[in-house]
Amino acid sequence: MTPDAIYLQRLSRFIDVVYALLFFHLIINYLPTFEDMEWTHKPLGLLSHMVDNRSELLRIFIGGGLALMYWNQNNSFFKNLVKTNGTHAALSLIQLFLVCMFVYFAIADPGLESISSPALQAGSLALAGFTSVGAWVYASKHNLVRADMKEEEINALTKSNLMEPLTAVVNVGLAFVGPLAWTLAWFVLPPVFIWLLKPKNKS
């Protein structure tokens, strides 16, 4: 194994660990508290307590889902790499930092009380997504990808991973519409962009 291949392996492991910590951090911060045991007096016990705090559970679903989405985006690129270099590693770490900023903004304002919070969350994810795609394009231009990958495969992978940042870009604007529109967009927009970015059959 070449030094650059070892470097890639270490970079990939580091990114996986950070994503695992981010996912854990989101869950711990969003799960409704039950230290006072008040839920024991409710009709359905703990289930009633969870229903009463359904907004927090929705935040976990969205926040955790977005973190996993960007982790999956990262994996879709890294599994096709054979090595890395300083520039590619730097871009990958910048992308990771931007995802960390998303988690920071999400936890700072879990109730979306201010317009800036959802806008900053979506903005950080948009930058993270485009940085990840940029790192992949750089890797493909500097012989860091598998030698057997065809140009069509590289372009298709690039295009398919634009869904996440494009969704985030639209959601920057929807943050100024309202929390409900911003929240619903994370569910509605991804399928739309997947359809739009899907390769069209040539007749």
Image (tube, grey):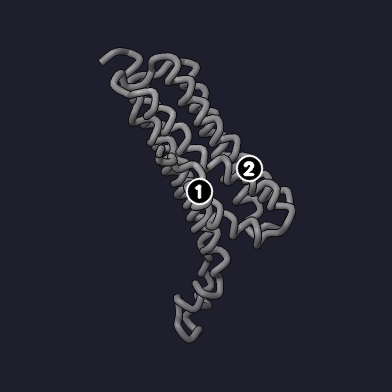
Q: Is residue 185 left or right of residue 47?
A: right
Task: Give the quarter of the image for residue 140.
Answer: top left
Looking at the rendered image, the quarter that the C terminus falls into is top left
Residue depicted at 50% across the width and 17% down the height: 87
Q: Which mark is residue 16?
A: none
Residue 124 image position (x, y, % from top left): 61, 39
2 or 1: tag closer to the N-terminus:
1
Q: Give above or below for 44 relative to 54.
A: below
Q: Amino acid at mark 2?
A: Val
Looking at the rendered image, the quarter that the N terminus falls into is top left
Q: Which residue is nearer to you in this view: 59 or 44?
A: 59
Q: Which mark is residue 66?
A: 1
Q: Which residue is mark 2?
A: 169
Q: Give above or below for 42 relative to 13.
A: below
Residue positioned most to the left? 1
CB-based contact (under 8 Å), mark 2 and mark 1? no
Q: Rounded to the nearest whole Å, what is the CA distance between mark 2 and mark 1?
A: 14 Å
Q: Is residue 25 left or right of residue 4?
A: right
Residue depicted at 45% across the width and 38% down the height: 160
Q: Which residue is nearer to you in this view: 116 or 169?
A: 169
Q: Residues within 10 Å of mark 1 (few under 14, many from 20)?
A: some
Residue 74 image position (x, y, % from top left): 43, 35
Residue 173 image position (x, y, % from top left): 70, 48
Q: Amino acid at mark 1?
A: Leu
Q: Which residue is nearer to you in this view: 163 or 197?
A: 197
Residue depicted at 67% across the width and 57% down the height: 112
Residue 116 image position (x, y, % from top left): 73, 48
Nearer the observer: mark 2 or 1; the answer is 2
> SS of the residue at dot 1?
helix
> SS of the residue at dot 2?
helix
